[in-house]
Image: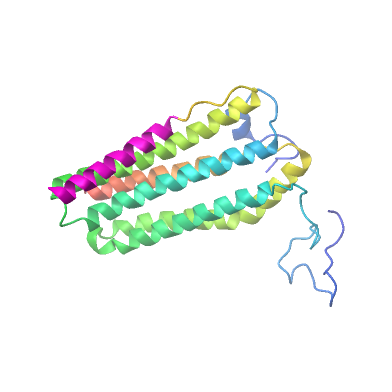
Amino acid sequence: MTEESGRGRLASRLFPDGEEPDPRFTLANERTFLAWIRTSLAFLAGGIALEAFAVPIFDELWRRVFAVVLIGVGGLISLGAASRWIRVERSMRRRRALPVPLIVPLLSFSCGAAMVVVVLAILL
Amino acid sequence: MTARPRARGGPARTAAGLGRRPGKEPGRPQHRDPGLQPERTVLSWGRTLLLFATVSAVFLRWLPHYGGWMVVLAFLAASTAAGIYLSQRHRYGRQSRGVSAGVLEPDAVAVLATTAATCVLGGLGVWVVLG
């Protein structure tokens, strides 16, 4: 680790320009990334558990479809979290406004769709 | 930070006996941030490692349904948790020094490695569900 004597290779490639932001903002950005990763892991574990657990509620095809969709949403959220972490860090270095989080509508839509599916599964 | 570690009061104990690396004085704060940013960030990593461990247990729970591939998934999730756990002390020191110095390089390796682990788990998960 060369954090004090110079900048690491990966960080220099990802963040080539701008000025060093306040370290507290960098840490806040890291914590936000971690919160998204935990959300993503919940979707991932949910998808695995759904396929194995929800045996009597859905028939086999739909169970698999929902499980794959849940895991896919988890993957998208984790990719979105990393991309947002990079873009926020770049914006802070360039003293620009922070980017709009595109994963927030993804998360809202996924949760809403999951609710609808569960309600329909109970009613039908 | 250059002085040899000394025990606070009481009988003198060696740094090795306390599991501390030399160069860090016990009892002396490593940073002076009243917002405790390094603590909060290390705790956030701690929550993440707990969730990786939990996900690993969930994978093992469904081993009878999916079969042997779940062992690979559980091992991957547990390894990620272990990797975070083993780097926590180094992370806290690095972040404390960064906050004290006013310059902290973003930890791209940890962020990208965690993302990669999550995506590989997701890819294997889809494969296991479909297979």
Count of numbered labels shown in the rendering? 0
Relative side of A23 to B79, left or right:
right
Measured along the vertical axis of the image, is residue B79 above or below residue B41? below
Q: How is the image coloured?
A: rainbow
The answer to whether one can see residue A64 in this image is no
Q: Residue furthest right?
A: B3
Rendering quarter of residue B64: bottom left
Residue in view at x 56 percent, y 57 percent: B85
Q: Where is residue A34 shown, x and y percent of the image?
A: 51, 45
Measured along the vertical axis of the image, is residue A53 above or below residue B120? below
The answer to whether one can see residue A50 in this image is yes
Q: Nearer the viewer, residue B73 or A59?
A: A59
Q: Nearer the viewer, residue A14 or A28?
A: A28
Q: Nearer the viewer, residue A113 or A76?
A: A113
Q: Where is residue B40 shown, x and y percent of the image?
A: 62, 50
Q: Is residue B60 magenta?
A: no
**In the image, which residues are magenta?**
A102-124
Residue in view at x 27 percent, y 44 percent: A115
Q: Where is residue B58 shown, x and y percent of the image?
A: 35, 59
Q: Is residue A106 magenta?
A: yes
Rendering quarter of residue A53: bottom left
Residue in view at x 28 percent, y 62 percent: B63
Rendering quarter of residue A14: top right
Q: Where is residue A62 shown, x and y percent of the image?
A: 17, 45
Relative side of B79 to A25, left or right:
left
Measured along the vertical axis of the image, is residue B19 above or below residue A72? below
Q: Main secondary structure of the magenta part?
A: helix
Residue in view at x 87 percent, y 58 percent: B3
